Image (spheres, rainbow, N blue to C red):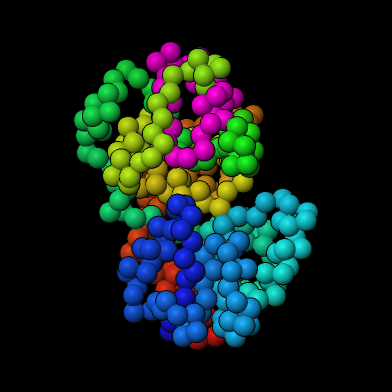
Amino acid sequence: MKIFIPNLQESWVVDRFRDEFIENYKQFITNSIAECNIIWIISPWTWREIPKKFLNKKIVLCTIHHLEDSEIYGKGLKNFKKLDRYVNHYHTLSKKTSDELKLLTTKNIYVFPFWVNSKIFFEFNNKSIIKSKYGFQNSQYIVGSFQRDTEGKDLKSPKLIKGPDQLIEILKYYNKKYPNLTILLAGYRRQYIISELEKLNIKYIYFEQTDFTTLNELYNCLDLYIVSSRKEGGPQAILEAAITKTPIISTDVGVASEILDPNSIFNMQNYYSAKPNTNKAYKNVLKYTDENGFKFFLEMFRDIINN
C-alpha cells in the first residue's frame, strides 16, 4: 500500500495532520503520484491541481471537512459534482457532515475525526503557574477563542459560518456576569472579534502567532472555551480543549455531540445555562488521541485496498 498526499502549505491545521501522518507511517507514503495506490485529497479544494490521468487511474480518497450551504444547495454543488466523478471514497470528520454528504453522493463514506496529538496538547497539573506565566490573576475569568472569525477577502467582515456574531452576544452576557472578564484570542483573522470587543470595551489579549507549546499553555489558562459556530467539520478546538481538560461549551456542530456532555451544548436561546463537563469530554476524547486516532485511518486505508 502506497499513499500520496498532496502538499498543502496553507498554514492550516491540516498541514500538521498531513505531516504527522507521514512522520508516523513513512512506510506507506510515497512522494511519487505515479507510484501510489491511493491518492488522499486531504483538502478537497486542491483536487484540481492533480492531473486527471492520475485521478482516473488511482483510488481516490477525499476528506470533506464540512459542507457549506452553497455546496449543498447552491452554485458550489456543480463543483462538487465534478469532484465526485473522480472520488472513490470519502472521509468526513463527523456524522453531521456524513449525513449531508449522503445527499450528494452514493460513494462510500468513512466517518471519524482527525486525531489530537497528546504530546502537544495536555493538561498541566498546576494551571495557576501557567496563568501566572502569562500575567493572569486568579481573580480573572478567562474565556478563550482560537478559531478564525473574519473573511479573508477584506479582513473585517465576519465569517458567519464560524458564528463570531453569536460569540459576541454570548460575551456580552459573560461581561455582565464576570466584572473581571478577559478574552484570550489566538490565531489568524481575528479582526472582526477584536473590533467588536473594542466597541464594547471588553478586555482582551491577542496571540496572533503561536507555536504549539504556547497554544497548549493558553488552553491551560482558560476558565472557559466557547465554540459558537453555525457549522464545523471538527472543530479541532473541541478535541484540544477536551484533552487539556479545558472547560468548554459549544453549539451542536461537528463532533460536539460525540465528545461533549449534552449539557455542554447550547443554542442562542439557552447558552447561559450551558455547563462544561471536563471529565466526560476527556474520557470521550481519549478514543482519538494520536496513537488511537491513527488506527482509524490505517484501518480505512486497508479496507480501501482490500475492497
Residue for point 60% across, 55% down: 66
Of the pair 78 and 11, the residue shown nearer to us: 11
- Picture coordinates of residue 56, whole percent (x, y): 63, 83
Quarter of the image that includes the C terminus: bottom right
**Which residue is depicted at the point 37% across and 69% down?**
22
Residue 212 horizontal side relative to residue 193, left or right: left
Residue 191: % across, % down: 53, 31
Examine the structure image and report whether residue 28 is included in the region drawn in magenta: no
Q: Is residue 185 above or below residue 153?
A: above
Q: What is the count of numbered marks?
A: 0
Q: Can residue 303 be seen in this view?
A: no
Image quadrant in which you'd find residue 272 = top right
Q: Is residue 266 above or below residue 290?
A: above
Image height check: is 183 above or below 14?
A: above
**Which span is picked out in magenta?**
167-196
What residue do we see at 34% from left, 75% from top? 26
From the viewer's perspective, tell me whether residue 86 is left or right of residue 197. Answer: right
Left or right of 62 on screen, residue 140: left
Q: Is residue 79 left or right of residue 181?
A: right
The picture places residue 153, in percent across and down from the top left corner, at 63, 41
Quarter holding the N terminus is bottom left
Q: Position of residue 189 (x, y in %)?
A: 52, 38
- Decide: is 117 above or below 229: below
Of 255 and 262, nearer the camera is: 255
Residue 53 appears anywhere in the view:
yes
Q: Does the magenta run of residues contain 181?
A: yes
Frontmost residue, 37 versus 269: 37
Name the residue located 44 percent from the left edge and 19 percent from the top edge. Answer: 203
The image quarter containing residue 105 is bottom right
